[in-house]
Amino acid sequence: MQRTIETFSVENIIEFKHNLLSWAQQFETVLWLDSNNDHQKYSTFDGVLAADDFTSIHTDYYKAFEKLKEYQSITKDYIFGYITYDVKNDVEQLSSTNFDGLNFADLYFFQPKKLFFIKGNSIAFHYLKMVDDEIKDDFEEIQKFKSPTSQVPKSELKIKLRIHKDEYYAKASRFLEHIKEGNIYEANFCQEFYAEDATINPVEVYKHLNQISEPPFASFLKLEDKYALCASPERYLKKEGLHIISQPIKGTAKRLVSELEDAKLASDLMRNEKERAENVMIVDLVRNDLSKTAKKGSIKVEELCKVYSFKQVHQLISTVVSEIEETTHPVDVLKDSFPMGSMTGAPKISAMKIIEDLEETKRGLYSGTVGYFTPENDFDFNVIIRSILYNETKKYVSYSVGSAITAKSIVEKEYEECLLKAKAMKYVLLNSK
């Protein structure tokens, strides 16, 4: 589908990005992706905002990938959206019956009427023809846009745990028993923190979360009354031409104020046997997933267990790449590797069954993915972690965290890792306007 493209330049790009996100709240459907100027090898832009759906697809998990494949093939345009973790039930004979306080559709994608790409100080407006006469007016309006003051008072949040500490210890021990029995080698065990009767300002909470984290795969999703405020450091999968890139994260250490002590923690993380073993297991799983669509002999590990440092934590990240045939459909590459290994475990299906049995909350959007397809059949998707999910109508706010349980896991340390990952989300919920 044809789009009119006009490019503008602004002096203060940070202010423009803030204004753009606030301005976009007039629409029922908004997805904002922000790389926070992370110019690593595979970055494409600094920010992109998609707003105002022209067409869309939302469905439960049943034949979800087949429906997405049809929608993406017919639309032949930019489409933005998400795939929840529970679409695993479309890929394997699995089910999800745990508690769900949020009620997002299992899969949602939309074709935006208005699309903005930001690179450096330039903004490219990609508008569908039906609205392209609004480009100049919109640019001027965004430049001077002032966020309206919220009329809804922020509620005092009482954050609760879905799994209490003693119960967490007992469940983590059961994961270890499964490992000893040879049912799994590793599993990502997640727990939910939540607040009921909650009123938050999603834009302000997102801005605060992004500001204290500055991750390369941040995103803000608004879908009518549902929001996902995401400060993800992790890429799930990217397609550039026939080139596929996966960058799983496994291995976490906290940041310290002292440069010397902080550097030591990063160095210790890189050499930590348990953390490296976690990462290597997932790399093997990713290689296996990519092999389903890869040309023979094309899978390579570009980086193994490299330390990347973010504002809150150090992480071990590996980069696995492959090449696919021209005839391979982009949706099949996603389907054959979904859900991502870093959020499941190994062997994947056994891990997912045990996870479903021992976790208390339906994961939904958490540990799913958000991203986009281009008209050229490329795509880029993150992993939805370090995220706050909000149902405005139900006044329910939720964030989940997890850690990888392996044979070398010490239950108390896994619990501490979860609390470390939860710290940023808890802080912004209790301290945002």
Image (tube, rainbow, N blue to C red):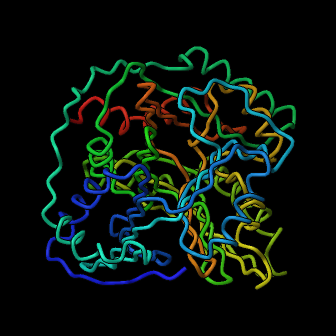
x, y (%) of residue 186?
73, 42
Q: Tell me, yes or no, if residue 258 can be seen here.
A: yes
Location of residue 128 by image quarter: bottom left
- Does 350 sit left or right of 243 as displayed? right
Nearer to the camera, 388 or 163:
388
Nearer to the camera, 290 or 141:
141
In the image, residue 2 above or below residue 168: below
Q: Residue at x 58, y 70 (%)?
A: 373
Q: Tell me, yes or no, if residue 270 can be seen here.
A: no
x, y (%) of residue 15?
17, 63
Dividing the image into 4 quarters, which one contains the C terminus? top left
In the image, residue 293 above or below residue 400: below
Nearer to the camera, 209 or 23:
23
x, y (%) of residue 206?
33, 46
- Does 161 sit left or right of 188 as displayed? left
In the image, residue 425 above or below residue 379: above
x, y (%) of residue 63?
79, 51
Task: Give the total number of marks visible in the rendering.
Answer: 0
In the image, residue 353 above or below residue 10: above
Q: Residue at x 34, y 79 (%)?
A: 124
Location of residue 362 by image quarter: top right
Q: Residue at x 45, y 81 (%)?
A: 3
Nearer to the camera, 288 or 410:
288
Dividing the image into 4 quarters, which one contains the N terminus? bottom right
Q: Residue at x 42, y 47 (%)?
A: 222
Location of residue 286 by image quarter: bottom right
- Does 410 sit left or right of 34 as displayed? right
